[in-house]
Amino acid sequence: MAESWVNYAERIGVDLHLELSGPGGRRAALTRALREAVRGGRLAPGTRLPPYRSLAADLGVARNTVADAYAELVAEGWLTARQGSGTRVAERARPLRRAVGAPAQAPARAGGPRHDLRQGRPDASAFPRAAWAASYRRALQAAPSEAFGPGDPAGRRELRETLAEYLARARGVRTEPDRIVICSGFAHALRLLFGRDAPGSTGGAGGAGGPAGGGVLRGPLAVEAYGLGFHRDLLSAAGVRTVPLPLDEHGARVVALGPERAVLLTPAHQFPTGGPLGPERRVAVIDWARARGSVVLEDDYDGEFRYDRRPVGALQGLDPERVIHIGSVSKSLSPALRLGWMVLPERYVEPVLAAKGEREGWASVPDQLALADFVACGSYDRHVRRMRQRYRGRRDRLVAALAERAPHIEVTGIAAGLHAVLRLPPGTERTVVEAAARRGVALDGLAAFRHPDGPASAGDGLVVGYAAPADHAYGAALEALCEVLAAA
Ligand SMILES: Cc1ncc(COP(=O)(O)O)c(C=O)c1O
């Protein structure tokens, strides 16, 4: 393709090197070359571009080719065209400032670990782009015009209907679409329930254990002694006091429940220690809630991923009037979608809707419609099945590698989810996490999840998120982890 030094020094005061190469013909090549010249700062804001005819003659292209390229860049905002003053580089098309000699490409975000074994992250490289795009396209084509107006705070009916069926089939949830409220994930559900996003909420105004201003539920809230600090912080910012419940291999010791108004549990797979809530405890916690008039919040964050047997059904199935079941696509599809759901006892539906406000303010309606299609056409089931196999394979590789390379390290918890807990000899957790960091392996120790007022520590351990790396990177991450553990 043509390459030309165009000397417009006399006419526009710049020497401009335009290389017309790459796919798509001359018009596309010229558009690209001019855009790069503006974006990179070689054509400064305000610079007047040559008339079509002269540039066309210099480059040996048709006049229309130049006219079309200019028009496209005007439409994109890189150039402006005004009667009488010709075509100029737009004033706001300021190039990104960068230090002399700095690379033109933005570097990958600083601080990304070489080997990512952090919990809570699905394999982002496995996002089902084609199937999601197909669902999105179908959903947009089928959507009535009103879908593009302000959204219903309950969420799109199409999604609530699909979820009611899916959750009944896959998780044993007993519900109907009118009991489901769409939200932007588990964290958002907590905010809605405890008042941070409620109208008139004053956040921590209630003080420790006091009412969360405007919230649907009030503290104190019993929580598992190990859990996500982010969720505890969110609750405490809403003025909700959390009371830690001790844990053992059967999950939370619900006999220790007292006069709390609610309890938050991860019954399918305790986060992060990894045991399921034992059958007697499932019954006992429902009995407690009935006797006290309390409610159980069920965080079903990875309930679809069980590898040793079929997943245990949701606790909600035992008593839909005593359990708020909360789920999201953050583990199954992507935490970037910010889509989740709350399955509510009837008495909480109106208060939660009131907390959400008059219109949907969080969960994109087109995304909701796409998810409804994605579930209804079977893509969600197919994706979960595929990821279940992939994660199961990774967990098996982790267990096998440790048995060979670091046999003193025990893998605890059930074969489920996206993470495993490795038990460490007492007093070694911190050193091992630091050694891993030096080797480029990002992961957390168990201590990072401990409730500050909780009972004695559950021992030393590592929480290994085996889902996070892309498939091709998992072997190297595992190797690096084994090296660290073998040396520990
Ligand atoms: C314990 C636990 N609960 C819930 C979630 C889901 O959170 P969200 O739906 O806000 O992304 C996660 C995800 O990392 C989690 O680890």
Image (cartoon, helix red, strand yellow):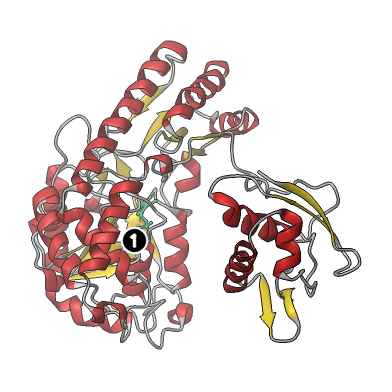
Corner quadrant of residue 201: bottom left
Nearest the eye: 115 or 303: 115
Q: Which residue is mark 1?
A: 186
Q: Is residue 246 left or right of residue 309?
A: right
Corner quadrant of residue 195: bottom left
Nearest the eye: 460 or 246: 460
Q: As displayed, is residue 429 above or below residue 292?
A: above
Residue placed at 64% from the left, 68% from the top? 70
Corner quadrant of residue 166: bottom left
Q: Is residue 62 left or right of residue 179?
A: right
The amino acid type found where label 1 is placed reads Phe
Nearest the eye: 94 or 470: 94
Q: How many marks?
A: 1
Residue placed at 20% from the left, 59% from the top? 373
Q: As displayed, is residue 246 above or below residue 43?
A: above
How far from the left and from the top, in percent, is residue 208?
44, 73
Q: Is residue 236 visible?
A: yes
Q: As displayed, is residue 336 above or below residue 92?
A: above
Nearest the eye: 177 or 292: 177
Rendering quadrant holding ligand 1 = bottom left
Instruction: Quadrant for the N terminus, please.
Output: top right
How far from the left and from the top, in percent, is residue 105?
69, 48
Q: Is residue 100 left or right of residue 219?
A: right
